[in-house]
Image: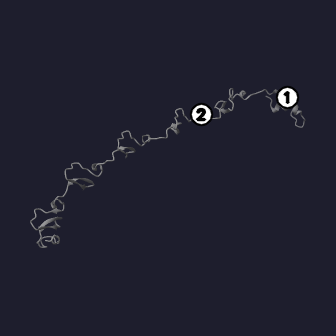
Amino acid sequence: MSTIRDLWDLGEPWEPQVARNWGEAISDAVDEVPNRTLDDLSDVDASAPDIGDVIVYDGVNWVPQDPDKVLDDLTDVDVSSASSGDVLVFDGTNWVPGDTDKTLDDLTDVDVSNAQDGEALIYDDGTWVPGDTDKAINDLTDVNTTGVEDDNVLVYDNGVWVPGSAAESLNDLDDVDAGAPDDGDVLAYDSGAGKWVANDAYATTDDIDTRAIVFAIALGG
C-alpha cells in the first residue's frame, strides 16, 4: 500500500519550495491500492454476516453478531428451565427462573413438615415450627404440677407454683395454732410465737396480747 512518503519521495531530496505535480502523484498512488474488504483484515472474521449484523470483538477477532440480544444470550443468565409466570432470581452465580408464589415452607426460617390440623407456628430456637396452642397449666414455665392430688391448690414456692393442700380449717393456716380450743375461746395473737392462738376470751392483759381483747370484742365475746 502506498504511503504519503511514496507521494513525495520521487528520488530527489525533499524540497518544499519546489513545486510538485501532486495531482498526478496521488492519482498514481490510488491506482496502486488493491480492492480490500473488512474480511481481509487479519483480526476480522466476517465471512458470513447477516443483514443488520454488527461486528463485535470476541477476545480474538472481530466477528458478526446480531445486535438484538435476548436474555439467554447474556453470560450470567440461564433461562433454559423457565415456566409461565416465573421471574429471574439470582442463585449466587446466575440469574435463573424462579417462582414468586412462595409458600411458608419455602422460607428459610420455617419448617412446617410436621404440621397438624389446628396447630400454629411457634418460634423455636431460630425456626418457626408447628405447635399446639391448646396449652395445659403444666405447660407454663413457672408451674410444676408433679404429684398433684385431688383438692390440691397451687401454692407459690420460691418462683414456682406447686400443688399444695387448701386450708380447710383455722389450724391449716401457717400463722394459726388453735390447738384444742375450749368453748368460748378466741384467737389471740402471740407475738412470741408469731401466731394466732386459742385463748380464754376473759383473760387479763397480763396473760395475753391486748389484741385478743379487741378480737374478742369484734366477735361479740
Residue 28 - label: 1
> Is residue 9 among the parts visible in the rendering?
no
Q: Secondary structure at mark 2?
A: helix
Query: Which image quarter holds the C terminus?
Result: bottom left
Residue at 59% from the left image edge and 33% from the top image edge: 73
Asked if one can make out residue 27 in the rendered structure from this viewpoint, the answer is yes
Residue 184 occupies which quadrant of the picture? bottom left
Tag 2 residue = 73
Query: Residue at position x 26%, y 53% from top?
Result: 161
Task: Give the side of residue 26 with respect to residue 87, left or right.
Answer: right
Among the 4 quarters of the image, the one containing residue 72: top right
Callout 2 environment at 10 Å: few (<14), some (14 to 19), or many (20+)?
Answer: few
**Quadrant placement of the N terminus:** top right
Categorize mark 1 by other alpha carbons within 10 Å: few (<14), some (14-19), many (20+).
few
User: Dot 1 lies on which element?
Assistant: helix
Colour mode? one colour
| In this view, 157 is above or below 113 | below
Against 85, residue 150 (above or below) is below
Closer mark to the observer between disc 2 and disc 1: 2
Q: Which residue occupies 74% across, 28% down?
A: 37
Which of 95/60 is in front?
95
Q: What is the CA distance from the residue labelled 2 to the residue labelled 1?
A: 49 Å
Label 1 is placed on what type of residue? Asp
